[in-house]
């Protein structure tokens, strides 16, 4: 019975995604979407997260939207920073790879953090090992040994909202 409920929930989630992608409520699209949702849920065999129903929570959607706004703000700020560095005659850059520690627990949250860092111009997440992220930064302006300051500067702006979404 538990397997059936799991497959039913997977089918519903896939069907909702189908509706969002097609943006159509005609009967042919609903039938095709329903059939594909059932086939995909049977074929995925547990590839969706075990607690996918958590992502239907309105509170999580609210914090996801808040994270998107914060990410957009920092992308704009970083674009101006990189533009300044490109246009400045002395090109004030000091590139390097820094090691930062995250307090996020789930793999999904760490992946979103790494992607948020990478989407911000001037930074690129190179690797994730356990709770450590290795980030290429366009201007390492502090000592490399100060991981707390690096973490605060790079990941500190994203972790609070991601913690509310995933953990």
Image: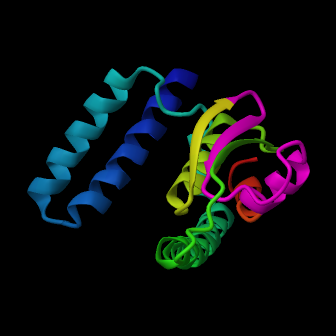
Residue furthest to the left: 28
Judging depth in this view, the residue of 2 and 131 nearest the camera is 131
Horizontal relation, residue 146 to residue 5: left or right: right
Could you tell me which residue is drawn at 66 percent across and 45 percent down? Answer: 96
Horizontal relation, residue 41 to residue 7: left or right: left
Q: Quadrant of residue 130?
A: top right
The answer, for residue 158, to whether it is visible in the render is yes
Residue 104 in picture, x, y percent from top left: 78, 44
Residue furthest to the front: 90
11 shown above or below 30: above
43 shown above or below 140: above
- Residue 118 magenta: no
What span is in magenta?
129-156
Horizontal relation, residue 37 to residue 88: left or right: left
Judging depth in this view, the residue of 39 and 164 nearest the camera is 164
Q: Quadrant of residue 129?
A: top right
Judging depth in this view, the residue of 65 and 55 nearest the camera is 65
Residue 57 in picture, x, y percent from top left: 63, 59
- Residue 138 magenta: yes
Residue 90 in picture, x, y percent from top left: 57, 72
Q: Quadrant of residue 14?
A: top left
Horizontal relation, residue 132 to residue 1: left or right: right
Q: How many marks?
A: 0
Judging depth in this view, the residue of 4 and 108 nearest the camera is 108
Could you tell me which residue is drawn at 48 percent across and 71 percent down? Answer: 86
Quadrant in the picture for the N terminus: top right
- The structure's colour scheme is rainbow
Residue 123 in picture, x, y percent from top left: 58, 54
The answer, for residue 1, to whether it is visible in the render is no
């Amino acid at each position: 019975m538990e397997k059936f409920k799991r497959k039913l929930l997977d089918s519903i989630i896939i069907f909702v995604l189908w509706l969002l992608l097609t943006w159509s409520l005609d009967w042919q699209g609903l039938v095709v979407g329903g059939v594909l949702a059932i086939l995909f849920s049977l074929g995925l065999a547990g590839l969706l997260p075990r607690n996918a129903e958590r992502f239907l929570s309105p509170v999580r959607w609210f914090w996801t939207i808040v994270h998107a706004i914060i990410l957009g703000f920092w992308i704009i700020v970083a674009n101006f920073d990189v533009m300044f560095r490109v246009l400045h005659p002395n090109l004030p850059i000091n590139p390097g790879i820094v090691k930062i520690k995250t307090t996020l627990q789930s793999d999904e949250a760490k992946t979103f953090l790494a992607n948020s860092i990478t989407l911000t111009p001037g930074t690129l997440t190179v690797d994730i090992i356990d709770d450590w992220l290795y980030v290429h930064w366009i201007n390492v302006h502090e000592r490399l040994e100060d991981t707390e300051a690096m973490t605060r500067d790079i990941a500190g702006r994203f972790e609070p909202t991601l913690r509310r979404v995933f953990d």
